[in-house]
Image (spheres, grey):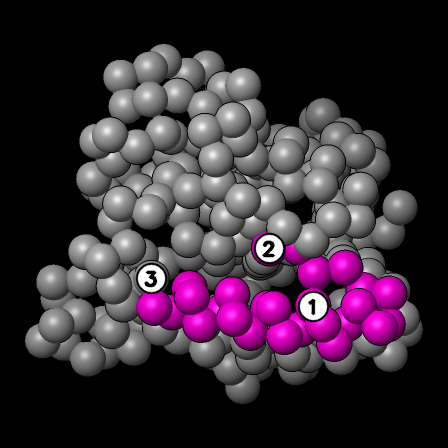
Amino acid sequence: MGYVLILGANSDLGKVLAEKYASEGYDLYLADTDTEETEKTRQYLNEMCEVEIEVLKFNILEFYTHRNFYKALDPEPEGLIIAVNYIGDQKRSRKDFLEAKKIIDTNYTGLISILNIVAQGFEEKKSGFIIAIDSIIGEKNKHALYTYTGAKQGFVCHLEGLKSRLNKANVQVLTAAPGFVLTKETKDVENSGQFISMPGDIADEIFNTQQKCEDTIEAKKSFSQKIISLFGRHDKG
């Protein structure tokens, strides 16, 4: 079925998406900064699935490495999944521009850097799919975490233009807006009064939507049958 490149493979969403695509027969490039952690995912998946999985070191903030990183992939992937997320410290970013810059570069600038490279390759061969995950903090927190929200909104705007461009080349661009997702990245984010979706359920929804060649997943209460409230229970994630 070809390779899928997952950026942010150590994130909770990255891991469940890797499991989903591997279980469906896709080979994987798992890319993140901590290759020891990524190797654990590879070993786990290889016990479950008979697919090829390669662990790669990738830093979204090292823009100058992105082109060579992608050129080294052989074979070229047929799909890209962007599961990179950095919520950061909003309070710290008010006084420390380096923190604000890290939030922006991780969620916007760096993503556009690698995305433009991949998109060019897919456009030239006139095939492929791109999946990008929007904010995972929910609607309630967008003003409190405004640097993260602003970076994500800018990225989504970029994706909208990319959809229009790549549609002519038969390349799918899917934007997933899951609302609040219960992950290690959001464990300290306020979630009272919000519906909480689980990573495993979102992975199923993303895969099914991508396979149907649709281009948007919107957050909603019925995102999946396992969406829970703050005081609900969950058995998957």
Label 3's element? helix
* Residue 6 appears anywhere in the view: no
Residue type at mark 1 is Lys
Tell me which numbered mark, 1 or 2, is placed earlier along the sequence.
Answer: 1
Mark sitting on residue 149: 3
How far apart marks 1 and 2 lie (CA) works out to 9 Å
Residue type at mark 3 is Thr
Tell me which numbered mark, 2 or 3, is placed earlier along the sequence.
Answer: 3
Decide: few, some or many residues near mark 1? Use Cα within 10 Å; few <14, some 14-19, many ≥20: some
Label 1's element? helix
Mark sitting on residue 175: 2
Q: Please tell me which residue is depicted at 42% across the width and 53% down the height of the picture.
A: 135
Q: Is residue 172 magenta?
A: yes
Q: Is residue 15 magenta?
A: no
116 or 34: which is nearer to us?
116
Point out residue 162 in the picture as x, y percentages from the top left corner: 67, 73
Q: Please tell me which residue is depicted at 31% across the width and 42% down the height of the picture.
A: 186
Q: Please tell me which residue is depicted at 9% across the width and 76% down the height of the picture.
A: 95
Range drawn in magenta: 150-175
Contact (Cβ within 8 Å) of mark 1 with mark 2: yes
Predominant secondary structure in magenta? Answer: helix
Q: Please tell me which residue is depicted at 77% across the width and 59% down the height of the picture.
A: 172
Mark sitting on residue 163: 1
Residue type at mark 2 is Thr
How far apart marks 2 and 3 lie (CA) works out to 15 Å
